[in-house]
Every structure is written in structure tokens, then in C-alpha cells.
Image (tube, rainbow, N blue to C red):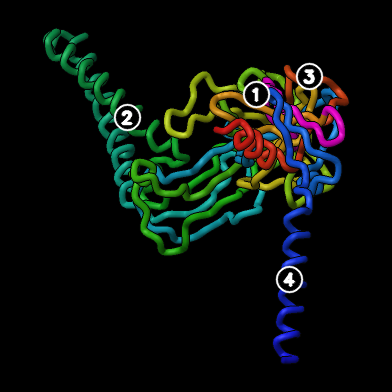
Amino acid sequence: MRNLLWMMLLAAVLAAGCDQAENKPEPPHASLKGNTVAFPPGAAQLETIRSEAAEAGKPATLRISGRLVWDEGKTVRVFPPFAGRVIRILANPGDTVKPGQALAMLASPEFGQAQAEARRGGTDFALAENNLARVRELHAHGVAPRKDLQTAEADYARAQSEMQRAQTKISLYGGNAAAVDQSFSLKSPIAGTVVERNINPGQELRSDLVLANAPAMFVITDPGRLWVQLDASEADLALLKRGQTLRLRSSSYPEQSFAAKVDVVSDFIDPLTRVIRVRGSVDNRERKLKGEMFVTAEIDIGTKPGVQVPAKAVFLSGDKYFVFTEDAPGTFTRVEVKTGGTADGGISVVAGLAPGQKVVVEGSLLLQRLARELAGD
């Protein structure tokens, strides 16, 4: 009997609790009017939404990635003009060399053949010269006919041309026809610093290495002046021009920038990467920057019109850009905007917003989804 009484009491309590739950009023919902979403005071969704004021346009900086390379106007890559074996190396990376200074010595049968041709050309010329003098003397005394004199003069001219060709060939590479020693000196054609050496003693070299895309035996340049190669996008083309000043920054020197100047803006766009090649030059007399170093070029492009907002405030719907503005506490309106590109982590808005107007930077997707649900989409 007592158990039955307890069960009846428990049922009465549960029934009373259900009546109270059914009678409890539901929390007010968000409402949609046009493009405006309004929340009632104290709505839980407001805790996930944050707004910031749109800032007036600031001086913008364009940043482009690039790398440093040798100044090709002051760089030479030395290849052997004759095949041969390296017998001695006379210059190493870091050495300063003068024009005509020997970099390496080669034992070259090809160069020896050129020396032999030069000596043979000199001998043939001397013989033709003596023969011409003898025929002239005979012709003057009426012994040799005119025909023999003309033949001797022709032989003399041919021998002279062949001697000049052979001697010029070896003199072009610093040799002479005094001895056929097959010893060839690979020399520097310019003054500069050796920055690469790609040969070793005993190595066999061919004269066609340049055609095989092999690395140069020596690379000589002036490291005090470098080129910077930049890959710009099509959107940056209107902001780049010859003579423009750049600031180069490297991760090696995070607190320092290096002045550079734009020398060339390419006249074509790479068909594969869709980038525009831009080349600049930088003074490197302090030798802090190194060839093949990655850098970031900064270009001041002035103040952009309109306002600037965080990138996460703008979202794409279809083919148009929108933001949500906070018109009043709990009231947000979707506004179409026209963007003007990115700069310094933000997006420039050239139409649709005014300076100081509050825009939603967190919760835009929630508002967009809620607006569609309230609209029945």
C-alpha cells in the first residue's frame, strides 16, 4: 500500500514538471528583413560574431618574391676552346683575377695541332716569299715568263693568308707558334672574382661542353653588384615601371633592407606560369647578399582609394563580393562591395563601404547561412 502511494506521488510530480516545460516560452528567433539579419537581445549567436571598423586607405606596399643572380653584364663563364686534360689549377673560388690571368693549365693535343698549323703556315709563307723573289728576278732578266710570276704571286698570297689565319687562331687564346708543346693556358677574359670552379686535376675536357649544357669550368663575376629577378603577376603590371625603387628583404637580415632599382620589365608573359619577369639591380659592395639568395621585393604604390578591411571580412557569393555591416547592436546587413586587390594582409574596398563603418570579421558565414534559412532558400 505504501509503495503504491509513493508511485502515485512520483507520477504527479513528473506531470507537473511536463506542464511547466510546455508552458515555458520559447526564446525569440532571429529575423530577416531584406538583407538585414536582426537578433534579439541576449541571443547566443551574438557571442560568435565580431566586428571591426573599416579603415581609411593607407599607403600600400606591393611585395613580390624573387632571387638574386649574378650581373650578366659583368659575368663570364669560361669553357675550354680545346679538348685536353687538366694538369694544374691556378685559381680557386674567392680569388680575384685580372684579364688574361691563367686559371688552369691543360695538356691539349688539339692546341698542339693548332700550334703546328701556325708553324707550318710560317714555313710555307717563307718558302712562297723566297720563290716569289726568285721568279721576279728571273722575270726581270727575261728568263721567266709572265705566267710563272703570276703563279708565284698567287702562291705567296695564299701562304700569307693561311699563316695569318693559323697564327691569329692561337694568338686569340694566348699561344704562339714558337714551340709545339701542346700546353694550353685557360685564361680569364675579364677582371673579377672566381665564384665557381667545376674542374679537378686530371679531368678530361671537351671543346663542346657548352653545347652539352655542362657547367662552366670557371664562373668569374663582380659580386659587388647583383641582379634581382622577380616573378610578378599580371595584376601587378600596372604598378611596375623601369627606374622604380625597390627595397629588398632577406630572411638572413630581417631588420635590414637593401636598395635596388628596376631595370627591365619583360614585354611578354610566361605562357606556362603566367608571370611577368622583372629584373632589377642592387649594390652589394658590402658583400652581404649572395647569388641565388631568395628575397622579397617591396614597392611603395601609394594610398589606394576606398577603405581597407581584414581579408576574412569579405566573402564571395556567385560572382560578387559581399560583407556584413553592423548597423546596430544585433543588426547586420549584407552589402555588396567592389574590391581593389590585397595589400598588407587586408583587402581594399573601393565601393560599398565608408571609413569607420563596422564590418563583421568573424561570423560572416554564420550570418550568410542564417539569412538563407530565414529566406527559405
In front: label 2 or label 1? 1
Q: CA distance from mark 3 to mark 1?
A: 32 Å
Q: Are marks 1 and 4 in contact (CB under 8 Å)?
A: no
Q: Position of residue 376 (x, y in %)?
A: 57, 33
- Amino acid at the residue labelled 3: Gly
Up-down relation of residue 231 to residue 293 (above or below) = above
Up-down relation of residue 85 to residue 349 (above or below) = below
- Amino acid at the residue labelled 2: Met
In front: label 3 or label 2? 3
- In what element is the residue under mark 4? helix
Q: Earlier in the sequence, mark 2 or mark 1?
A: 2
Q: Out of 195 and 299, give the one closest to the viewer.
A: 299
> Is residue 93 found left or right of 203 in the rendered image?
right
Q: Earlier in the sequence, mark 2 or mark 4?
A: 4
Q: Earlier in the sequence, mark 3 or mark 2?
A: 2
Number of residues whose C-alpha sits closer than 10 Å to that of mark 3, classed few (under 14), some (14–19) or many (20 or more): many
Q: CA distance from mark 1 to mark 4?
A: 86 Å
- Residue position for label 2: 163
> Is residue 307 found left or right of 107 in the rendered image?
right
The residue positioned farthest toward the front in the image shown: 1
Q: Out of 18 and 368, give the one closest to the viewer.
A: 18
- Residue position for label 3: 306
